[in-house]
Image: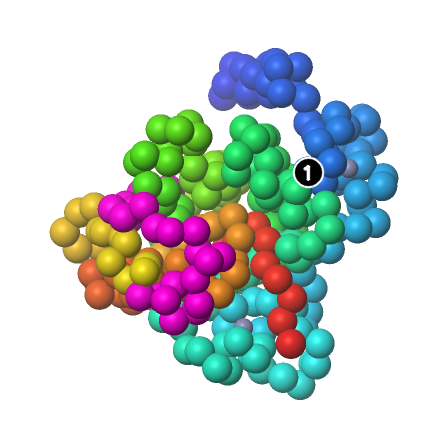
Amino acid sequence: MMGAMKYSIWKEATLDLLFPPRCVGCDEVLSEENRKSGFCNKCKENIHPVVEPLCRKCGKQILIEEAEYCRDCLRLPHHYNQGRGVFSYEGPMKDGMYRLKYGNRREYAKTIIRVALEQHEDWLRHMRPEVIVPVPVHPKKLRKRGYNQAEVLARELSNKTGIPVEPLVERRVDTLPLKELTPEKRRKNLKNAFNIRKNGVKFKKVLIIDDIYTTGATVDAIAKLLLDSGAEEVYCLYGCIGRGY
Ligand SMILES: [Zn+2]
Ligand SMILES: [Zn+2]
């Protein structure tokens, strides 16, 4: 046990040398005192972890305490049971998420997951997911980029919680950039984009993890697939989410 602990401290220190902790907002190498928060002094002011009141469905921060759901969720029902976001998708977080996805800044996952647990650990304990499923990317994209940012987040969450990661879902169609599509077209486009890897899902409670939540079309398509394959409850966690109204 002691040996394993010493090894892990040593490993952590070596990793810090190779990949020094950087501010998720601006990518500066962090000073000793800012390592705990994961943000430099300047970015701290402009980073907004999602706080109550939240939409009871998607987890967006909403303006009115009395409202149960955001306008988007009132308009469009979702397949998943409930979602939670870590940071508001604005300011320096937008660039940070871009680097997490395209710039090989996998180390950001540590900060994102640490804040995720500060905010949503009780929620996770209550929902008790048995497995974490990252939103998959198409194999072609995975080869090009070398990693899937959702899986990087999933692995870090798994390290911290002990909940296993299972890539139960695969992406079989390389979808069009979603920005160019209307919400209805997005949904249609995504309906057949995913596949369950094995026949049947043996887990009853599943947590999908993704980097950014926009309309929910992606996690919805995956949730539907999991629910049709044997899952009973599907929850979602995202690194960033927009604000709700
Ligand atoms: Zn910064
Ligand atoms: Zn909502």
Name the residue: 57% across, 80% down. Answer: 71
Judged left or right of residue 41, residue 143 is: left
Query: Residue 64 appears at what percent x and percent y?
Result: 70, 81
179 relative to 62, above or below = above
What x and y, as percent, mark residue 26? 74, 36
In the rendered image, the vertical position of residue 154 relative to residue 227, given as above or below? above
What is the x, y in percent for residue 56? Answer: 54, 74
Magenta run includes residue 124: no
Tell me if residue 179 is in the magenta stretch. Answer: yes
**Image quarter hosting the C terminus:** bottom right
Q: Mark 1 belongs to which amino acid?
A: Val
The reply, left or right, for residue 193 in relation to residue 235 is: left
Q: Which residue is mark 1?
A: 24
Q: Nearer the viewer, residue 125 or 219?
A: 219
Q: Give the magenta part as a residue range.
A: 164-188
Image point 68% across, 22% down: which residue?
Answer: 20
Colour convention of the picture: rainbow
From the Cβ of disc 1, is ligand 1 less than 8 Å away?
A: yes
Residue at 38% over, 51% down: 176
